[in-house]
Image (cartoon, grey):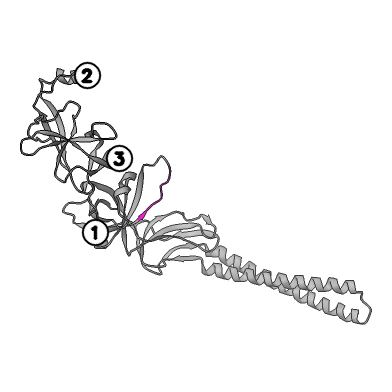
Amino acid sequence: MSRLLALALALLPMTASADSHACSEGSAQIRPVVSEKVSADPTRQRAFAGVVAAAHSADLAFQTIGRVARVAVDPGDRVSEGDVLASLDRVDLQEDLASARAALGSAKAEAAYARQSHERVRILAERGIAPIAQLERAQAARDTAEARAEAASADLARAREALGHGTLRAPNDGIVLSTAIEAGTVVAAGTPILTLADLRGREAVIDVPGEFLQVLPPDARFDVVIHAEDATSHPARLRLVEPMLGDNIRTRRLRLTITEGAEDFRIGSLVSATLARLDLPVMTLPLTALSGPAGAPSVWRVAPEDRRLARVPVETGRRLADRIEITRGLAVGDEIVVKGTACLGEGQTVGPMVAP
């Protein structure tokens, strides 16, 4: 929006009030005022800085516990599906496998012995030689040994699976955004090792004032430009408004999906995003433009033909930071005084517009 300076040329009449007396004291001087032409879509004039992020990213982790032997990639590396990203110490995993095999062999031997013992006691009990209590103890020992053998078999299966999961591979083509673990670190199953971004899709992440959301439609369209010379704009659409993190945070984070030319954007690049359009026109003015009582606000409009001032009643709507929505009383292109309104009067003439 254009903000312009004008010079107040006419003198104000003397009144009995202190404010008017102060105004009349300086009435012989030319007083500057600041004016602004009303725009139907002032949000288009504001660009929001942000960065490019991947549309999809994931934290990758091992599915087993172990010591990290090697991290094969660095942040910024591009990888293909199936590439090795990191690996655990296979010596430790093989030792765990050998231990699980030995434990299973021992458990099977104990189970076999317990079954034989139970069979002998059962035969003696049928002949009336062994008491029933001895038979019950033998049966319990057999069941316990067989359960231990099953548990050892499961441990062996997990050790074999862990050995197979000792290598972390890329699930898809992507770019490594960050690594969280160094070689030699002992990690548990599920501990994030690195973050991998999908090559498909890009988003612009920007922060906007909370009041900006009041004029933002759910399907808002933006124009995104890379911070570079001769950069062209690319269309984007609003995908997500992230939740507010706290009462003291006055900005909201928007995620914009870049719909065309996403391959031109590198992750981490600085961009600017501007609202492409609004479905309904929104006219706003600075709060300093309003005068009169709170229930009946008005503004000073400059007539384009003779530069004379006229007080115009207006109706206001939503407050947008330091601006206020004008719902009735003005038209697009009207020149309104936004600063220096305290000592103005009806019919007063202001000078020509000059650059600030």
State the CA–CA distance, disc 1 to disc 3.
Answer: 27 Å
Query: Which residue sits at x=83%, y=73%?
Result: 138
Asked whether the viewer can see residue 106, the reply is no
Q: At numbered mark 3, what does the secondary structure look like: helix, strand or loop? A: loop
Look at the numbered discs 1 and 2 and tell me whether their residues touch, using CB distance below 8 Å: no
Mark 1 and mark 3 lie on one chain; the one further toward the N terminus is 1
Which residues lie in the magenta part? 240-246
Which residue is denoted by mark 3 in the rendering? Answer: 321
Q: Nearer the viewer, residue 84 or 242?
A: 242
Q: Nearer the viewer, residue 16 or 307?
A: 16
Q: Is residue 260 above or below residue 231?
A: below
Q: Report the side of 287 relative to 136 (left or right).
A: left
**Where does the N terminus fall, quadrant-wise?**
top left
Residue at (67, 70) in percent of width and height: 152
For mark 2, does the 10 Å Cα neighbourhood hold few (<14), some (14 to 19), or many (20 or more) residues?
Answer: few
Q: Quadrant of residue 309?
A: top left
Mark 2 or 3, nearer chain start: 2
**Residue at the disc numbered 1:** 235
What amino acid type is highlighted by mark number 1? Pro
Q: Is residue 6 left or right of residue 149?
A: left
Q: State the image coordinates of residue 29 (x, y, percent, origin top left).
A: 10, 21
Residue 243 lies in the magenta-colored region = yes
* Secondary structure beneath label 1: strand
Q: Which residue is mark 2?
A: 17
Image quarter in which the C terminus is found: top left
Q: Quadrant of residue 267?
A: bottom left
